[in-house]
Each structure stands twice: as structure tokens, then as C-alpha cells.
Image (cartoon, rainbow, N blue to C red):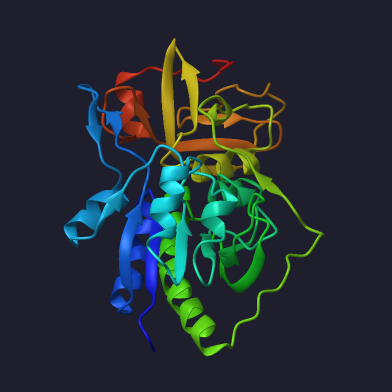
Amino acid sequence: MTALKLAFMGTPDFAVPSLDALLSAGHDVVAVYCQPPRPAGRGKKLRPCPVQVFAEGRGLMVRSPASLRDGTAQTDFRNLELDAAVVTAYGLLLPPGILQAPRLGCLNVHASLLPRWRGAAPIQRAILEGDDRSGITIMQMDEGLDTGAILLQEAIPITNRDTGQRLHDRLALLGGALIAQALVGLQQGTLTAVPQPTKGVTYAEKLTREEAKLDWRQDATRLERQVRAFTPWPGAWFEARGERLRVLDAEVVDGEGAALPGTLLDQHLTVACGAQALRVTRLQRAGRAPMAAADLLRGFSLEPGLLLT
């Protein structure tokens, strides 16, 4: 296989395995694009993103433009004379001048089985809605939001123990393997871009801290999925005794009687829900280490019958 001249465009942890796979396959990654460093931590010092850290560790040239819409950024990109650009969770929209510059176009590594879950948070939305599978789509990018033609897809099952983090890690590795495979197929002429189906389109809206609050009026099954989907961020939570408690693990159990949703049913942190009940098994107080529910209850009294609003 001939080495391709590539630019890589990505920002978070999810994108690192894809960049690593391109380098391992022997491709010539002449530039890495990622979002600019952001203030982080108590000191608000600028912190480079995971892709920048990885790329600089490999001696790659890193560019962090705030936008790709100005003429200078687009000229710099065209002057790279690329065979292709690989985009994985970059976080910036690519204007036509960028999309059309590489000889083979811009390829996107997307963490869903398109057209299901276009958008910002496909991993978490798939778990939250009870999907039994997810996967990676390698897509030929166009100007739409994850609307480009499909080059390659591979599915994996979602288990009942998958959290957002676990599924993220599995899909990140699969994304790296699949983009390397797709580039081989493009060089050999064995891949044909197929337009996405018009049916089955769903959108994965960006996650918010507000939607992570547990609403006990919902079914316990959905709340348990919410706990897993929003681990590690934004983290499912509820309030008790004026304090916000973050839920790290929970299980669905049979409800007891006709208690109002939000009622503590026992001394094991079992909460009545709209249907069945949710037993919180591991959680975290603000500024404290994660702990088992039994350990928390020894120093944080929550009596049966208490109604959590």
C-alpha cells in the first residue's frame, strides 16, 4: 500500500486511536488540526487537548485555528496538497473550501451507525435510548451535519453494563481500525460511497448538566440507563438534604407498594420510581471520593420514607 499524504483533524481522547492507527499504517500525516488549548483547573491555565499532546509527542506539526472560514486558514490547508483529510471529533465545521481541497476528500470517523445518531453525543444517546448496538461509520464528508455518503460501517453490541466511557473506549479503538481499512479500500478502488438511507435518521443532541438530574417519575429502567450513559460526564445526580449526590452505579429492583416516586424505600438507598425502583449502589458527594452506598449511609443519614424531590 502506498503511503498517503494526510491531515488529521481531531480534538478529544476519542480521536487519538484514529491518529495512532494512521501513523502505524505508515501514512504521512503532514499536519494535525485540533481546537486551541482551553483554560482548565483551578488556575485556569491553558491546557492542550489530548490530540495535541499525542501529536506533539510524535513530532507532528499541530495547527489550532479558531476557525477554518477565513481565507488564510483555507489557503494554508490547500497548500498542504493532501491526498485526504481524516476528521474524528474535531469540533469545528468544515467549509466547502476545506472539504474540497484533498484529492480524496475529507473522511469522518463517526461513533454511530448512521443515519442513526447524527450529531454531538451519539455514544451517550444510544445507551440512554436502550439501543442494543452501536458502531463506527466512515463517511465521505459533505456540508451537512453527518449527512455524507457511507464508505464503511461496523457494528458492536451495547451490553447492559456499558457506560458512556466503556462504549467510548471500545468505539475509539474500532474507529482507528476502520479508518485504516477504509484508506486501503480507497487506494485499491474497492470501496464505493453509498448515500445514507432517508429513513431512520435521529439526532444526538449535545449533553447538558441539567438533563443529568434523575427524575424519579421516570421508569427505573430508563434511569439506570441514564446513570450508565452519563458516566463519566455529565454524571447522573439527585439532591438529598440540600446536597447534590452523583450516582456512579445503580440497579433496577422491584418496587415496594405504591410509594410516591422519589420515596426512599429502605436502608439500602432504594428509590421508588414511576415504574419499579432504582437501588443506588455507588455514588459520590461533592469534593469526596466515590464510595459504596452502604459506606455513605453510615455518615450521611437518609431514612426510609424520605421523599427526594
What's the residue at 65%, 80% (across, down)? 192
Identity of the residue furthest to the right in this view: 199
Where residue 276 appears, x then y in whole percent? 67, 38
Where residue 282 appears, x then y in whole percent? 39, 38
Direction from residue 248 to residue 30 in the image, left or right: left
* Residue 160 visible in the snapshot: no
Where residue 205 sits, quadrant-wise, is: top right
Where residue 275 sits, quadrant-wise, is: top right
| Along the line of sight, the residue nearer the viewer: 307 or 128 | 128
Question: Where the N terminus falls, by quadrant?
Answer: bottom left
Vertical side of 19 occupied by 72: above or below = above
Vertical side of 223 occupied by 82: above or below = below
What's the residue at 55%, 26% (across, down)? 213
* Residue 155 visible in the snapshot: yes
Vertical side of 286 occupied by 90: above or below = below
Direction from residue 93 to residue 54 in the image, left or right: left
| Along the line of sight, the residue nearer the viewer: 173 or 243 | 173
| Along the line of sight, the residue nearer the viewer: 148 or 69 | 69
Question: Where the C terminus falls, by quadrant?
Answer: top right
What's the residue at 51%, 77% (across, down)? 182
| Along the line of sight, the residue nearer the viewer: 262 or 173 | 173
Vertical side of 115 occupied by 120: above or below = above
What's the residue at 39%, 60% (across, down)? 79
